[in-house]
Image (cartoon, rainbow, N blue to C red):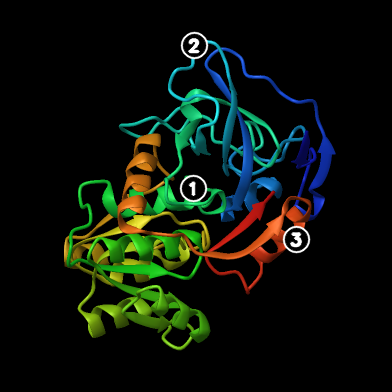
Amino acid sequence: MRAWLMPAGSDGFDKLYQDTLPDPTPGPGEVLVAPKAWSINYRDFAVVAGKYFGGVLQKPAVPLSDGAGEVVAVGAGVTSVKVGDKVQSSFFPLWIEGPPRMGPALGDGISPGMLAELVVLPASGVVPMAESLSYAEAACMPCAGVTAWNALHEGPRALKPGNRVLVLGSGGVSTIALQIARASGCEVIATSSSDAKLARLKELGAAHGVNYKEVPDWGAHIARTFGGVDKVIEVGGAGTAEQSMSALRTLGEVAFIGVLSPEGGPNPRALMMTGGSLRGIFVGSAAMARELNAAVDVNGIRPVIGKSFGFDQAKDAYAHAWGPESFGKTVIEL
């Protein structure tokens, strides 16, 4: 089988290389998946640069957590899926439901990665695709989609119709969150440094757009101009969290995903004024993925694919996803 690999000591996606590996076979409790499509997340750049939680890669590893394809074989004892089922990967293959269970994470440089023609996963590491989605669209869901669902519909302050939601930027999590929030009967405000991207976000259903280059104090501006928000999808991090807290209205929540702007020291004082809260989000469980996919089918949600690349163009896909032209999800397809 063909597979893309990150070499030991990798310091960037330019080090990715393609190789031919032996076809794997599933053991007891495992499934063999033939992915048809994959998507790139911001986290994947940290892994290939040796800056993820596991640090510098100690040996070659297959990248990416997100893929969708077909089950082509099952190991002994597997009854949850069968050959021919259309499935997507589950970011945390051992977090099935309930409170967070981090454990191994696909594509982290140690656990299995998805960017190969065949992948062996534990049976708990796959979830049925939404019936209404293509393989490419389903490949957008394991990380970005589940993260957005967790941020909006899980926790003590789950979204309600009529709530107001703030999404930051136009990446995969933010665009999917915008669509889920609109399907949930909520008003959405979006930020970006590009007026052109704000126009596209409005086409997706955002009621208002704020250019944060033109409005540096965008958090306070949103509170003054729109009366604040009930939920912020905080994909930035320490560098933007204080502004996100300033944008809350009474009893609002900042769903803290926080990877794009990790530097800085936010002062949580603004939470005192609104009774707001800050909740940490790290993707989610297989149960959340199933709930998300059910909602996708019912509401006709289709994740935004900004650009698609062929399997042999994986490095070009990474370069596009990293660049200023990216919008929504960047996908790789067979």
Under circle 3, the secondary element is: helix
Residue at the far front in the pictured view = 84
| Residue indicated by mark 1 | 143
C-alpha span from label 1 to label 2: 27 Å
Q: Earlier in the sequence, mark 3 or mark 1?
A: 1
Q: Residue shown at 39%/61% (left/top)? A: 234
Secondary structure found at label 1: helix
Q: Nearer the viewer, mark 2 or mark 3?
A: 2
What's the residue at 45%, 33% (across, down)? 102
Residue 195 screen position, x and y as percent: 49, 86
Q: Residue at x 26, y 67 (%)?
A: 270
Q: Is residue 44 left or right of residue 142?
A: right
Mark 2 vs 3, N-terminal side: 2
From the top left corner, tell me how far across and down residue 301 is, in percent. Answer: 38, 59
Q: Is residue 283 above or below residue 229?
A: above
For mark 3, what is the residue? 316
Which of the numbered marks, if any, corresponds to residue 77? 2
Left or right of 208? Residue 11 is: right
Left/right of residue 169 with respect to residue 254 in the rendered view: right
